[in-house]
Image (cartoon, rainbow, N blue to C red):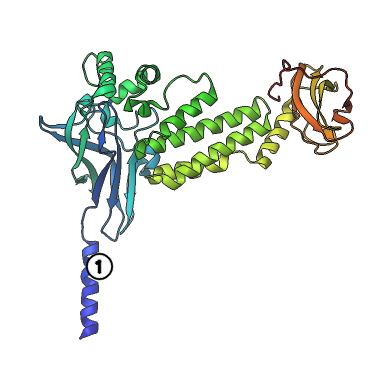
Amino acid sequence: MKRALVALVSVFFVAAASADVPPSATLALIPDSTLPGTPVAFLITISNPTNRPQTISNGVTLRVTSSHGTFDAAGVGGRTVLSLPREQLDRCSGAPCLTVPALGERQIYIDIGPMLGGNEFFVDRRLSIPGKYGLQLQMFLFVSEGNVTVVQTNVATLTIQQPAGANLAVWQFLQQLSNRDGWGTDYWITSGDAVGTEIRTKFPTSDYVVWVGTMGRVIDREVTVKQFDQALAMNPPSSLRDDLLWVKAKFLDQWSRDALQADRNEDQALSLADRARDAYTTLQRLAISDLMRKRATEGLPHLYTRRTAEETLRLLEQSDLPAPASVIPRVECVNRGVGNTFSARFGYANPNKAIKVLSLGDRNQVTPAPRDQGQPRVFKPGDHPNVFTATSPDGNLIWNLDHNTAVATADFPTPCGASATITIKQ
């Protein structure tokens, strides 16, 4: 009798799982309270209770309920049915779709984006006016050919804050720019760099500053990274934090590539790659969505390591123009230290019309050890004084470079004055 009861219960649950039960969907707003004119991210979790895969079409609408009535949010061109993020979709008969596995879940993350243009629903300026809004997403499930059923999420409450103080001043500034027509994400996309710079300059105490942390022209790369870090230090909403970490990592990665491929500066390239790696690993650890974790995981293997940087340099050398003439090192000046110690500044002249790369080794080393005292590996055409300083504990200090030598001695006649300048190594 007991075995029969267990079997009956098992059949009941299999039958229930096999029934045509649509998936359920939950919507989380991140954050659920925000400043006027700033978007929020949508984190959607879709659960399939059946024992067969179910397919969601590539289309979603947002029903908005407020004290002023109900409307469907409109994106670019007034469209109310918007596409799901293509990066997270599958292909069904050649068309984008979302497949939810049997008895499983799928997550869709509609990001705000580094330039605040990722969630197209917030093009609708009605979502920028202070107040409370009930948001409910509607998606469409393929039941059979030609038939669909609507899958609705829960109603999530969004609060658009009533700004005050510096925040109110920024909101009034944005309203002036939009002719009192609210502020949608399309404005951020078209005017964000200029507006972001204006907000940071004129309203530095405003909470809007964190939202424009990735906006503005890049004049100095280190200053731009500090701008990202300042925004991250302001305790941004987790969706914005993830975007800040992502764009910081990508920015440092590109800078690292430029340092190696344009300037042939391996040490700088590796230092920047390490900083990008820190940002990606932090994003992996903290990310609120599968999408952002995936972006971090995919970005990490592309960062330079010592091996891949040296391999890239070798490939670059193969494409360099000929540089047959030897690079000539020289001693610029010497400063005496305690006892027999002294430090010497070196420069070089490259008589070729092309860059010459001389890796650390017999053709580019300082003696006595350590043979690497910060000398360059990449030698640009022309004359370059004061490129690095080396220190001798005792005896002569020699830079062996491209079959030439520059010998510094404690009694070298030219002392290094305070006005001498050390340049960043090439």
The residue that disc 1 covers is 14
Residue at 74% in and 20% down: 380
Q: Is residue 93 above or below residue 80?
A: below
| Quadrant of the image occupied by residue 79 | top left
Which residue lies most toward the bottom here?
1
Residue 102, horizontal then vertical, whole percent: 32, 58
Q: Quadrant of the C terminus?
A: top right
Visible residue check, residue 145: no
Residue occupying the point 88% across, 18% down:
413
Residue 42 picture location, percent across and down: 29, 40
Q: Where residue 197 sits in the image (x, y, percent)?
A: 40, 18
When asked about the image quadrant of residue 134, the answer is: top left
Q: Which residue occupies the extreme front position in the image? A: 339
Which is nearer the eye, 203 or 103?
203
Please tell me which residue is depicted at 63% across the width and 28% down the height of the picture.
Answer: 259
Q: Can you say whether 414 is above or below 80 in the image?
A: above
The image quadrant of residue 35 is: top left
Would residue 229 appear left or right of 163 to someone viewing this image?
right
Indicate whether 330 appears above or below 392.
Answer: above
Q: Is residue 167 left or right of residue 318?
A: left
Q: Nearer the viewer, residue 25 or 242?
A: 242
At label 1, which amino acid type do we have?
Val
Q: Is residue 26 left or right of residue 315?
A: left
Quadrant of the snapshot with the N terminus: bottom left
